[in-house]
Amino acid sequence: MKRATFLIAAGGTGGHVLPGIEVARELRARGHECVFVGTSRGQETRLVPAAGFALELLETGALKGLSLLNRLKTVAGLPASLLQASRVLDRLRPGAVLSMGGYASGPVMLMARMAEIPVAVLEPNVNPGLAVRWAAPFVSRGLVAFPETLPYFANGQAEVIGIPIRREFFDLPRRIRREPFGLLITGGSQGAHTLNTAAVEALALWKKGRRLADLKIFHQTGERDLETVRAAYDDCEVDAEVAPFFRDMPRIFGEVDLVICRAGASAVVELCAAGKASILVPYPYAADQHQLLNARAQSAAGAAVLVEDHALTGDRLVRDVEQLWDQPSTLVKMEEYSRARARPGAAKRAALLLESLAGIAGKA
């Protein structure tokens, strides 16, 4: 089979980078070379080299959520970013480009299209980011995680494949025994102060109500609130694992009945793959409110309870958790609805599409 180089533009958060790495692993297993393009400010500088892939850096910035001065700086630097992207494309001559979103994706997509290099977009959120909305009419193919995203692309130019994530999430067996009741609280790799504060308040209420003995809690705090949260758990003498970051998240998913988390795209897809019920607390400052839209879609499907950030308190957390804890039939339905939204094989489907765009007859 013909071998090719593929360029993956992915940057910013782990939600953009990690799915790109899964696609790159699939392409590498099929004999191809993958190179990432990002910036020096995102998670890609840590995650991509750790996964064993090369990373090209562009000097480009954001346009949304910044002051007018900073937006003008980004616009002023755009010609240089486009030149850098053009040089990377000329040097690597990729068979196709996959855009995962992030600051570098715009210049790379534009210059790739000008060079007549096929471009595919993998959009993980219900509501695409600015670069994808701009590029959607011009890309060769759109790959999306949710059916709600299809209208952003020309008719027939996009398909729903899910988001490439680790296979272990799909392989988790259904959890039948719910004693003790397993609870995961996580604000992502950086933690979430709102979730951490509400959890500490909830611990005091559960201690007062004498229900802590029936709980097993996993809490990923991030670094900032670690000591405060850990002290609260120590004071309550609850069965808990508290850490700034959990590396083996599939194991923890297998031991819990309910997940309380933000609503980033990767988090939502992991919930679906594992068939987990959740309480979703969208990050209120996410670009274009994409986390809120992700959470609304999951809630509308019956798979999650949506609580907006400003409404989350310890009392609200206790009330929502106990409502599901005490109604196992409702929890089972939520798990079924969540699993129904899962789409395994996303990395393989993305790899096959990229091979097709590059003119390679890939092996299914």
Image (spheres, rainbow, N blue to C red):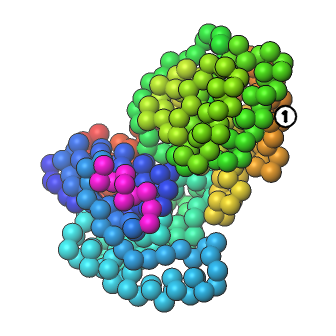
- Residue depicted at 71% across the width and 47% down the height: 194
Residue 265 in the image: x percent, y percent? 57, 48
218 or 128: nearer the eye? 218
Residue 42 drawn in magenta: yes
Residue 354 in the image: x percent, y percent? 33, 55
Residue 211 is left or right of residue 231, and the answer is right
Residue 288 in the image: x percent, y percent? 66, 64
Magenta span: chief secondary structure: helix
190 or 304: nearer the eye? 190
The answer to whether 116 is drawn above or below residue 9 in the figure is below
Mark 1 Cα-neighbour bin, 10 Å: few <14, some 14–19, many ≥20: some
Residue 99 drawn in magenta: no
- Residue depicted at 57% across the width and 76% down the height: 63
In this view of the protein, can residue 285 be seen by the observer? yes
- Residue depicted at 52% across the width and 40% down the height: 244
- Residue depicted at 62% across the width and 10% down the height: 177
Q: Which residues are magenta?
A: 41-50
50 or 223: nearer the eye? 223
In the picture of the structure, the residue carrying the numbered disc 1 is 315
Residue 216 is left or right of residue 270, and the answer is right
In this view of the protein, can residue 98 be seen by the observer? no
Q: Label 1 is placed on what type of residue?
A: Asp
The answer to whether 59 is drawn above or below residue 352 in the figure is below
Q: Quadrant of the C terminus?
A: top left
Q: Quadrant of residue 196?
A: top right
